[in-house]
Image (cartoon, grey):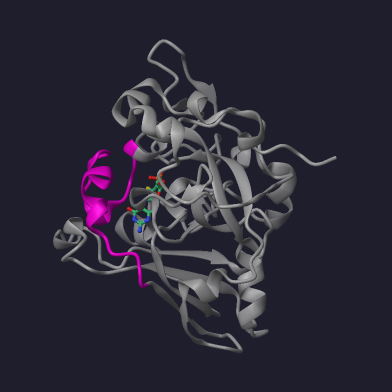
Amino acid sequence: MRKLGWSDVTPKPLWLNRRQLIAGGAAVLATPAMARIEAAPSRFSTDLAPNTLEEITSYNNFYEFGTGKEDPARYAGGLTTDPWSIVIDGLVERPGTYDLADVVKDRPLEERIYRFRCVEAWSMVIPWIGFELAGLLNRVGVQPSAKFVAFETLVRPEEMPGQSSPFIEWPYREGLRLDEAMHPLTILATGLYGEEMPKQNGAPIRLVVPWKYGFKSIKSIVRITLTDTMPATTWNMLQPQEYGFYANVNPQVDHPRWSQASERRVGSGIFAGRENTLMFNGYGSEVAALYNGQDLAVDY
Ligand code: MTE
């Protein structure tokens, strides 16, 4: 039986909150702001109710636009996302600079409603639109010696005001082991809530790895490099004793400055209480085998 996506079951006015309805007026109800993206539902989607579009687009981490949670919504509008291209290089058969349209071409788009757990102990449920990274990697041809995939975000200080602060060594970088990158849960997302990716969420294309802390899910990607050595990653470079390369969601391994045992669902209200954090953010049955034989307290 075909699994229903959120859009099959939820009339748009229900997930737009009151403020958006008031701000947008009747026009919101009558005409969608952007072209809707057709995407198939996925067996990997959670049945949990997604956060509202307002929550997902107004409480963000995107340090290229500042360190405040509201800074991305305030400043990302100035980012030029068209034209956009991605350099795919390193240990691949067909390296090159690929236009975004070419990267997305022939990729079957799916809606993936994923739990999203930030290392800061808040969480959301987000209806991403995207495609499996594995499909793209197979298309460019991974050489047998490749063991890791490195990702980089755009550097453009004139449009990204946070990049004038040197506290991060730009570009923002992330990485995955090749088997993590090839896992079917790992997607490149080009939209959410059935529409193009909002700029504050990492337009036009970002990574989403739902069993890892949110900082692994790098935004606005311009480079993907296949390599045989573990790549340098932004938060690990900044604070190696606090942020490891793996960053798997793990309620048993606390951050040195706070507990990871529970989390606050954004929008749940101050009286709602906290929820227990799940090992691998609830995706253990899919991904635990990737870490057989690894001590996750050491490989944190
Ligand atoms: N990617 C880039 N380029 N820059 C960033 O600052 N922040 C990360 C991740 N990807 C970040 C990034 C962190 S810490 C989190 S929690 C998520 O993006 C937040 O994604 P969201 O704003 O879409 O919820």
Image location (x, y in percent) of residue 69: 27, 39
Q: Quadrant of the N terminus?
A: top right
Drawn side of residue 250 relative to residue 71, left or right? right
Seen at 37% across and 25% down, the residue is: 21
Q: Is residue 150 above or below residue 129?
A: below
Q: Is residue 147 above or below residue 57?
A: below
What is the quadrant of residue 25 in the picture? top left
Image location (x, y in percent) of residue 31: 44, 39
Residue lying at the far top of the rendered structure: 271
Image location (x, y in percent) of residue 261: 51, 29
Along the viewing direction, whichever of 93 and 275 lies nearer the viewer: 93
Along the viewing direction, whichever of 207 and 122 lies nearer the viewer: 207
Image location (x, y in percent) of residue 244: 45, 55
Along the viewing direction, whichever of 85 and 297 lies nearer the viewer: 85
Along the viewing direction, whichever of 178 and 297 lies nearer the viewer: 178
Seen at 48% across and 65% down, the residue is: 175
Question: Which range is magenta?
Answer: 58-83
Q: Is residue 292 above or below residue 107?
A: above
Residue 216 in sight: yes
| Residue 79 sits inside the magenta stretch | yes
| Residue 260 sits inside the magenta stretch | no
Seen at 31% across and 51% down, the residue is: 62
Residue 293 in sight: no
Seen at 55% across and 80% down, the residue is: 228
> What is the total number of numbered labels drawn onto the structure image?
0
